[in-house]
Amino acid sequence: MIKRMILIFIAALALFLLISSLTIFQEGNPVPLAIGMVKLQTTDESVVGIPGKTKRYLVRATSEGDQPFLDFMNSKEWSFKDQAGASLFFTKNNEELAVKGAMYTRKYRVYTFGQ
């Protein structure tokens, strides 16, 4: 009986991972994103950094759109310049920066800094 329950659990878990794998692994390793989600839920922060090779930030998706991220960038002295599709462009001391925003899940957005 216990073997059957374990087998059913493993099969259900495998099915869940198979169905959800595109969402879970769309940004690579999901562990740093999960840690970021926990930070967003348990702190007053509206933007959290995601460790990795590329500079990325996680933001809770709200009706305010990109405004929490724009406020975060403004606090770092980057001025919002323009938007083209999902890309946001900033300037600071004659330096330009492109950041691409993308929905990770329906509750979170990931912002990736351009190279």
Image (cartoon, grey):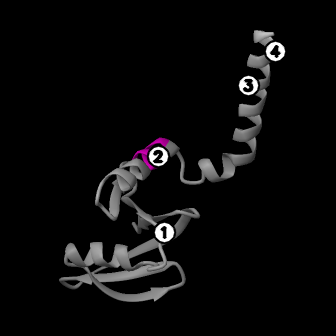
Q: Is residue 32 shown in magenta?
A: yes
Instruction: Count neighbours of disc 2 (C-alpha within 10 A) and say few if under 14, some if 14 to 19, many if 20 or more.
Output: some
Amino acid type at mark 2? Ala
Residue 34 picture location, percent across and down: 46, 46
Q: How far apart are the two marked residues, 3 and 2, measured between alpha carbons?
A: 22 Å
Within the image, what quadrant is residue 32 found in?
top left
Q: Which residues are magenta?
A: 31-35
Farthest-out residue, bottom: 82
Above or below residue 36? Residue 69 is below
Marks 2 and 1, how far apart in space?
15 Å
* Lower position in the chain sequence, tag 2 or tag 1: 2
Label 4 crowding class (10 Å Cα cut-off): few <14, some 14-19, many 20+? few
Residue 76 appears at what percent x and percent y? 21, 72
Q: Nearer the viewer, mark 4 or mark 1?
A: 4
Is residue 50 something that shows in the picture? no
Residue density around tag 1, few if under 14, some if 14–19, many if 20 or more, within 10 Å: some
| Secondary element at image label 1 | loop
Earlier in the chain: of badge 3 and badge 2, it is 3
Question: Mark 4 to mark 3: distance in Å?
Answer: 10 Å
Residue marked by disc 2? 34
Q: Nearer the viewer, mark 4 or mark 2?
A: 4
- Please name the residue that numbered disc 1 is placed on: 61
Query: Can residue 90 be found in the magenta stretch?
Result: no
